[in-house]
Amino acid sequence: MNKFERRDFLKLGAAAAALAAAGCAGTSYKARVVVVGGGFGGATAAKYLRLWDPAIEVLLVERANVFTSCPISNLVLGGFAKMDDIRQGYDGLRRHGVQLVNDEVTAVDAAKKTVRLERGGDLSYDRLIVSPGIDFNFGEIQGYEPAMQSGRVLHAWKAGSQTIDLRRQLEQMRDGGVYVLSIPLAPYRCPPGPYERASVIAEYFKRSKPRSKVLVLDANPDVTSKAGLFKAAWKDLYPGILEYRGANKAIAVDAATMTVKLEVEDVKGDVLNVVPPHRAGDVAMKSGLITTNNRWCDVDWRSMESKAAPGVHVLGDATLSAPAMPKSASMANNHAKIAAAAIVELLGGRTPEPLQILNTCYSFVSQKEAIRVSSVHAWDDKERTLKAVPGSGGISAARTEAEGTFAWNWARTIWADSLG
Ligand SMILES: Cc1cc2nc3c(=O)[nH]c(=O)nc-3n(C[C@H](O)[C@H](O)[C@H](O)COP(=O)(O)OP(=O)(O)OC[C@H]3O[C@@H](n4cnc5c(N)ncnc54)[C@H](O)[C@@H]3O)c2cc1C
């Protein structure tokens, strides 16, 4: 297939024409893969497709012009890292021959094998990868959308402008104020992420506003990840600062009175960080890729191919998680390698072999100390899914500064692996 054939030029708008003018026309490829979303899943898939078969043309459609990492974003909230630490451009992918299209995909037509771009025009594909991350079911918390639009209630659960806004609110909060963090019922992206956030913000208060409090309202009955290690850290490091309440689900929020309404009582705060329940990203919803509970996209774990749309592979947080599999950057990066390897096989007329994958999630409990959980997931032929390998993985014996160093190294390594 020739890059940007005449049919594409007829269909494409300014964005794609500009891409072709940037020196891409003329090369001949055996197939085209379009990737939607340049986060951990999509960026990694685009890169590895090019590494494993340079005869495949790869177009990555991403609406943002820089990548912003959720991992390490909690340290930005604590004042222990900068936005520049968690941002980087897409030049690394361009060097691998990935063609970047800075646009938003508004619809997928799996029958015609095209995606529609917001700025106009369609892109055709032989195989499609969709890794849009999450969007939120705002309607499950009454009053959420107006409260968020007022700028007073934030989730900051997609790193970016809300990370900056939440940090500013924490800096401006009076000493003696209350920061409320409301956690949705699982599954949500990054099971230990909220507890890491509570910990590093407690450390910030301990140093800079010692009369302030972190109040964690968890819809889940108990801490969902590394519970013993988090609770030990809170007891040792933040007594009188961090209070944890399980089974406290937010049902409404009011920015005018800065109140979170729970099933049994109302709680007031000075900074309200309410994280709503999640679902697969909007484009998955609009394109009929959601299969389960109106929220998640089921896939064949040997290829990441959608169970709703042949030829479309769904990665990362948008998937209906396999048993005991967290929604994490680590997993999205691994899903991408399953999909890239499978697509190379399928385009070569072969059958993909299942891969075994590894998850590792570090969490900071203070500026320097971290804890870790890891697991291995392998294909189970009988149950037709990936399952945690019994006896694999585990958690840190204790919080240490060495784990904190490993956590930063893990982040730098996955950024380089996904984008470098
Ligand atoms: C506070 C926090 C801390 C975390 N810490 C860790 C950690 O320490 N370790 C870990 O493993 N995981 C961590 N995670 C989880 C991790 O960030 C996610 O699991 C990971 O980002 C999922 O990758 P993804 O590709 O599914 O989605 P994302 O990385 O969110 O990427 C989705 C991309 O798609 C783009 N996009 C969406 N729709 C469209 C469209 N229609 N058109 C064009 N572009 C589109 C978006 O702009 C975005 O760039 C953390 C998450 C949070 C919130």
Image: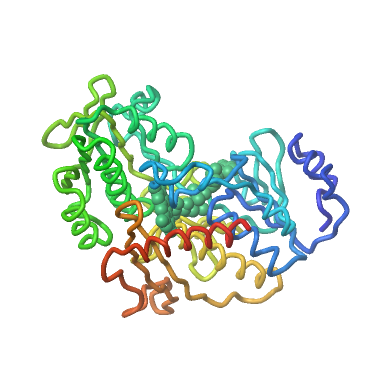
Q: In this view, does 348 lie above or below 5?
A: below
Tell me the quadrant of the picture where the C terminus can be found.
bottom right
In-front residue for pair 280/312: 280
Q: In which quarter of the image is residue 267?
A: top left
Percent across and percent down for residue 329 are 46, 57
In-front residue for pair 70/184: 70
Percent across and percent down for residue 326 are 37, 60
Instruction: In the displayed orientation, state which residue is furthest to the top.
Output: 256
Residue in the image at 22% along x and 43% along y:
216
Coloring scheme of the render? rainbow
Q: Is residue 69 left or right of residue 4?
A: left
Tell me the quadrant of the picture where the N terminus can be found.
bottom right
Percent across and percent down for residue 378 are 43, 76
Label total for image? 0
In-front residue for pair 358/314: 358
Instruction: In the displayed orientation, state which residue is furthest to the left.
Output: 264
Residue in the image at 71% along x and 56% along y:
58
Q: In this view, does 230 lie above or below 268?
A: below
Is residue 140 at least partly visible in the picture? yes
Is residue 132 at least partly visible in the picture? no
Q: In this view, does 1 lie to the left or right of 111?
A: right
Residue in the image at 33% along x and 27% along y:
172
Q: Is residue 7 left or right of residue 420?
A: right
Percent across and percent down for residue 262 are 17, 36
Q: Is residue 337 above or below residue 37?
A: below
Q: Is residue 139 above or below residue 307?
A: above
Q: Is residue 414 left or right of residue 225?
A: right
Residue in the image at 29% along x and 23% along y:
255
In-front residue for pair 58/198: 198
Instruction: In the displayed orientation, state which residue is furthest to the front.
Output: 207
Q: Quadrant of residue 320?
A: bottom left
